[in-house]
Image (cartoon, rainbow, N blue to C red):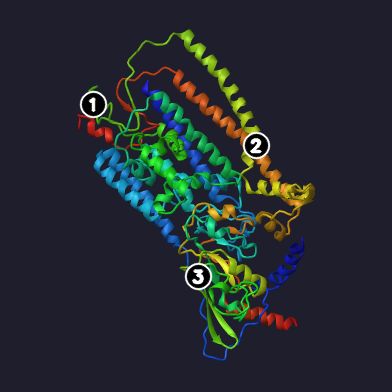
Amino acid sequence: MRKAKIIPVLMLPAILFSRAALAIQRFPKPEFESAYTQPQTQIPLPRGEFLAYLDVFVLFASLCLVTWLVLKKRSRLLVFLMSLFSLAYFGFYREGCVCSIGSIQNVSLALFDHSFVLPLTVLLFFVLPLVFTLFFGRTFCAAVCPFGAMQDLFAFKPQALGSRLNTVLGIIPYLYLGLAVLFAATGTDFIICRYDPFVGIFRFNASFGMFLFSGILLLSGVFIARPYCRFLCPYGVLLNWTSRFSRRHLSITPSECIQCRLCENSCPYDAIDFPVTDKSPESKPLMVKKMMILTILVPILLLVFGYTGSRMQYALAGVDSRVKLAKEVLALSKGTGIPEKNAGGNTRSVPEEESFEIKAFKASGKTEAQVYSDASIVLKKFYVGGWLFGGFTGLVIAMLIAGRMLPVYRKDYVTNKGRCFSCTRCTDYCPIKS
Amino acid sequence: MPGRREFLNTLMRGGILAALGLLSGSLLLRSRDEKSCSYGFDCSGCNRSKSCMLSAALEARQTVWQLDMTKCIQCGRCATNCVMSPSAVKCTHAFAMCGYCDLCGGYFKPGTKTLTTAAENQLCPTNALKRKFIEDPFFEYTIDEELCIGCGKCVKGCGAFGNGSLQLQVRHDRCKNCNECSIARNCPSQAFTRVPANKPSLMRGLGTELLNETAKKNQVNA
């Protein structure tokens, strides 16, 4: 604890004079006799702030343009060209940061941590695509998001996955969203950014593991079109749900569907709903039975998953640095951090090399009690968060079950408003042009 | 019945819009407590001590990552944990603080016998710290930024034996300003913080004026 005592002494001049005087001036400033001029310390400035607003403007402009191309021009070629622009600007020029997908975390952290400053630009990156989707469908996914644009280039031989597989894999984004919000809101980690497969490609710089992940993802994208967008993207969940209530949406045909079936295989993302003309209405007792099952099932699922989530409190909180530190400090104070070495029958404790975390803890002058109380606050957050995350998972599963239970009737081939990325491929297949 | 469905859709749309509006509004117009004022944003001269309302919310609030040397323990993770390789964190020299020592704790390995620029004497693993004779007994130390990997070995040496003029700093021309800094996540002393983009440096002893001021105050106190 020697260092801990030195620190407050060092802090004294800092409080008395200025931040600049914090270091100890052990050696006086030399007085040069020769004509030596001291070089200036170069401090490169960050990217200009107005450029952040330019990004928002480009986002807004390209959202407007793509929406117009999708809904009015219905031109796949122009949408494709626009997606190339987005890939170049938001992807390779802006290097994928800050993107709308990652902004989920900034918004959730800002909601729970009042000291976190949420830049207006980040908020706009979060809100703008959602508002556009609410009115015009997922035109953001069509050609503004650089991740989608990148994967779109690889969709050579898309295979239909079938509705069951689509539904099951479709749960992953909900879990990813739930975890991302949980970890961001507790101030633990930004997992969306950390495991972002494309940012490494945009920067030509990533760890081997991440390159491997993005390589596998892009290559699997040859057969499973846009795997990230469909089965991982947490922002896609929000867009999916806002798009379902969209005011206007891309339609396969500009006027009446003539049931020609030409568009049946045109969608690489399985986002075209086929007609279900079996009009036989389900019997009333069966419907009542289904409703009863659902009303019982939903609370059970919520409770079971919520409880499971809350039991995962320690496992989830274990990745938090504050909890990790508390564990290390506890081990240190108990002496378990020092392994007992049995050499020749002699039991003597060998002081283990202190971890940097412990060194930093000692240098910071914090007490053990402070560390423990910090950790217990985090643990409490994860308890509540675990309930919420588990409950959310249960709700998602209940929703999917309900979705499959309820009867469907559709006359025509229509785009699934939730899943459709508005890429306008299907419009090329429709023989009706006006 | 398309009419009913359309009505429900409109209702939901209105609901989502209202929710988004409420969310944005509460995030922008929220009162910022004193804790957030000490976040690094200059709130001096601000008489709205309890709450910063719309005007403050709409100010440019871009942040960048920076390393607070008062917390740094020079563990060396800056060199290895940045998403970029080499790291965006580099050693930066505050010349105004430097003592121009012959026996530089940042340049020489401890126990070096002859004070020459021979490779075996150097603490820096990449020969990024350059030593140049100025006049007896002063030597100038500069950093070759291309070679520096940000390991902080010289920073540790300088802080332990010298004035602490060698400091680790995020170089903003190299930093990608990730949404969450990968070094910050792994920093054992939580020395990485988001700072306002218009005040991107947390370096100590940058200007000679500041140091001179301190010296004057010292004299007065003495």
Q: How far across and down, in percent of the image, does residue A126 sit?
A: 46, 45
Q: Chain of mark 2?
A: A
Please give the residue where the numbered disc 2 appears in the rendered image: A313
Q: Residue at x 48, y 8 (%)?
A: A285
Please give the residue where the numbered disc 3 appears in the rendered image: A43
Question: Do the numbered discs 3 and 1 sit on residues whose CB atoms are within 8 Å?
Answer: no
Q: Residues within 10 Å of mark 2 (few under 14, many from 20)?
A: many
- Tag 2: amino acid: Gln
Quadrant of the rendered structure where residue A155 is?
top left
Question: Do the numbered discs 3 and 2 sit on residues whose CB atoms are within 8 Å?
Answer: no
Q: Residue at x 56, y 82 (%)?
A: B139
- Tag 1: amino acid: Leu
Q: Is residue B60 above or below residue A249?
A: below
Q: How far across and down, in percent of the image, does residue A238 sit?
A: 46, 37
- Tag 3: amino acid: Ile
Helix, strand or loop at label 1? It is: loop
Q: Observer-nearest residue: A235 or A319?
A: A319
Helix, strand or loop at label 2? It is: helix
In the picture provided, is B95 more to the left or to the right than A157? right
Please give the residue where the numbered disc 1 appears in the rendered image: A262
Q: CA distance from mark 3 to mark 1?
A: 61 Å
